[in-house]
Image: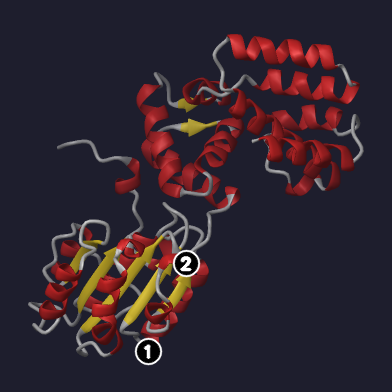
Amino acid sequence: MSYLVLARKFRPQNFDEVVGQEHISQTLKNAISEKRIAHAYLFSGPRGCGKTTMARILAKALNCKDGPTIKPCGVCENCIEISKSSSVDVLEIDGASNNGIDEIRALRENVKFSTASSKYKIYIIDEAHQITAQAFNALLKTLEEPPSHVVFIMATTEHHKIPITILSRCQRYRFKLISGAEMVCAIKNIGQKEGFELDDEALNIVTSASGGSMRDALSLLDQAVSSSNTGRITGDYMRGLLGLLPKDIIVSVTDNIAKGDIHAILKIVKEIYEQGYNILQFARDLRDHLRNVMIYSINPAVAEISFEDKKIFDIQKTLFTVSRPRAYEQSFIKSS
């Protein structure tokens, strides 16, 4: 059997497993329980935060043999086929490659046919913002008054590109970036099941590098686990894997900023450049470190840092007033 990447192996299969989108999961469960199922949904938000996954779960909830139900069984024929993207009644359409008026006209003809074995015929349109204006216009009437057995679920990372005429015909759900704490908890659970462990610094690096995208975080984990010879992944290992600067360099630059030692800072920057590190990435890393110093100075409880880093932050927070790290951070934001 071929290897299944973590992002696919641990793709949520029910509403309760979706990380960081409880506000949407609960709303959809309430709608199903009260039999208030809309004919068109629009899921928008950043990449890798669960839009397509939520669409598939909603499809299973509606077409499960026990459904519509807020807890699809996952073992009936309909649930299994939807999970494998092989259901004839749940069609996943890539908006980027099926964005023309001819494809939409074909879809309009297809919705007239009844389902094969399910209660609903569901169209999941990914990257919906790629559909042309003419194609959207051709879809308007069908989207407003589809047959009773048809449900449309559109997903997009660019909500602002969807015409207002389409938006007004859909129930809209905004997906948010997954917080560091939620991501850390999910990664730890996956690590326990897969037999690997990340130290606190490695967890912070993964959550920071993924930018709130669970899919990106799991892709980084796949890369780290595949290249590591041990079951424990350290912060230093993740830094090397991602080409990040060693932590002590960032700490040293911060110390010299506090001292006002320009010559020492320029010397370090020169060494960084000569070693082949990305200067822009260095600026971002330093910006993030200064932000953490500022947050830790104000309220240590909310700073997302490892136990080992707290010793460093306890020292560095005394080197600045709260306003100084903020001023430096703003300077780096402008420069990057």
Q: Is residue 229 above or below residue 310?
A: above
Residue 151, disc = none
In percent of the image, x 74 and y 39: which residue is there? Answer: 292
**Looking at the picture, how far across and down is residue 21, in whole percent?**
49, 64
Check whether the beta carbons of the residues at disc 1 and disc 2 lie within 8 A of each other.
Answer: no
Colouring of the image: secondary structure
Mark 1: few/some/many CA within 10 Å (<14, 14-19, 20+) = few
**Looking at the picture, how far across and down is residue 281, in whole percent?**
59, 28
Question: The N terminus appears in which quarter of the rendering?
Answer: top left
**Looking at the picture, how far across and down is residue 297, in whole percent?**
85, 41
For the residue pair 131 and 14, the one nearer the viewer reads as: 131
In percent of the image, x 36 and y 57: which residue is there? Answer: 12
Residue 36, disc = 1
> Which three-letter amino acid code belongs to the residue tagged 2?
His
- State whether residue 54 appears in this view: no
> Which three-letter amino acid code belongs to the residue tagged 1?
Arg
**Looking at the picture, how far across and down is residue 10, in whole percent?**
34, 49
Identify the residue position indicated by label 2 in the image. 160
Q: Is residue 27 left or right of residue 69?
A: right
For the residue pair 17 and 213, the one nearer the viewer reads as: 213
